[in-house]
Image (spheres, rainbow, N blue to C red):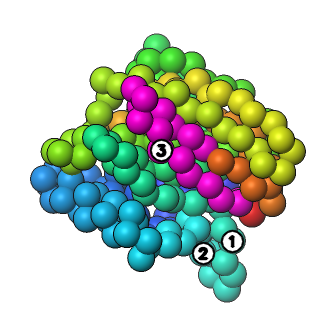
């Protein structure tokens, strides 16, 4: 069974985003300052986030990406990783998963052959604190096929990392090699990401 890149022992190379959102040993104030600093660099155009990659010995396999962008009031870190199993609280209590996502509000989209897990970590631009009290609208446009879909913005957190990994998103089909755009609307402030996944 393949290991999740965020929980396994395989080295994971990440420049931003997931590292900030998922590393719990750093004090929240430092995380906030780091996120704001990276976001300002990203907005200035000097930053180009490399793809997230898992590096088994002797090879490099790219599995997703991490990007940072801002609006007037928010910083959003977008992670796209392999699909994740998501558990309702009752399921998690009986199954005791060690990998995957705990659903706090919403539902899990089914995992298909082209599924990825798209997650948006939303931070308050003024304080750097994670926001779970917003209702994002997440729209994916597959520029290659022309297909548009709205993701259910499920509020969740990693089952092992807990509240320090709170984010919105879901599993969604993004075929390899397709150009895509993800727009995240936060009360009229829209942040747009684009890219191509391997």
Q: Nearer the viewer, residue 84 or 127?
A: 127
Q: Position of residue 169 (x, y in %)?
A: 53, 34
What residue occupies the far right of the structure in this picture?
145
Question: Which residue is disc 1 drawn over?
Answer: 61
19, above or below 76, in the image? below
In the visual, does 19 lie left or right of 84?
left
Mark 3 secondary-structure assignment? strand
Q: How many C-alpha atoms fall within 10 Å of the one at disc 2: few (<14), some, or many (≥20)?
A: some
Label the magenta part by its dominant secondary structure.
strand
* Nearer-N-terminus badge (1/3): 1
Q: Nearer the viewer, residue 35 or 23?
A: 35
Q: Position of residue 46 (x, y in %)?
A: 42, 76
User: Which label number is shown at residue 55?
Assistant: 2
Q: Residue at x 43, y 29 (%)?
A: 188
Mark 1 secondary-structure assignment? strand
The answer to whether mark 1 and mark 3 are in CB contact below 8 A is: no
Q: Nearer the viewer, residue 42 or 104?
A: 42
105, above or below 30, in the image? above
* Nearer-N-terminus badge (2/1): 2
117 in the magenta segment: no
* Nearer-N-terminus badge (2/3): 2
Magenta stretch, residue numbers: 182-197
5, above or below 129, in the image? below
Q: Position of residue 168 (x, y in %)?
A: 46, 33
The answer to whether mark 2 and mark 1 are in CB contact below 8 A is: yes
Q: Residue at x 47, y 44 (%)?
A: 191
Q: Position of residue 42 (x, y in %)?
A: 40, 66
Question: Which residue is disc 3 drawn over?
Answer: 191
């Amino acid at each position: 069974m393949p290991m999740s890149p965020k929980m396994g022992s395989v080295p994971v190379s990440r420049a931003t985003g997931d590292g900030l959102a998922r590393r719990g040993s750093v004090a929240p104030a430092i995380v906030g300052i780091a996120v704001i600093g990276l976001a300002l660099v990203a907005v200035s155009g000097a930053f180009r986030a490399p793809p997230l990659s898992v590096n088994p010995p002797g090879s490099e396999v790219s599995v997703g990406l991490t990007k940072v962008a801002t609006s007037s009031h928010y910083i959003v870190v977008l992670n796209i990783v392999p699909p994740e199993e998501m558990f309702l609280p009752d399921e998690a209590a009986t199954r005791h998963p060690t990998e995957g996502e705990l659903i706090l509000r919403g539902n899990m989209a089914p995992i298909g052959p082209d599924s990825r897990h798209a997650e948006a970590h939303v931070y308050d631009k003024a304080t750097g604190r994670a926001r779970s009290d917003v209702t994002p609208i997440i729209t994916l446009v597959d520029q290659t096929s022309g297909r548009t879909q709205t993701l259910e913005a499920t509020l969740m957190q990693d089952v092992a990392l807990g509240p320090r990994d709170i984010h919105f998103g879901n599993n969604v089909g993004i075929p390899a090699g397709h150009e895509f755009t993800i727009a995240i609307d936060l009360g009229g402030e829209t942040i747009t990401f684009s890219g191509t996944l391997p």
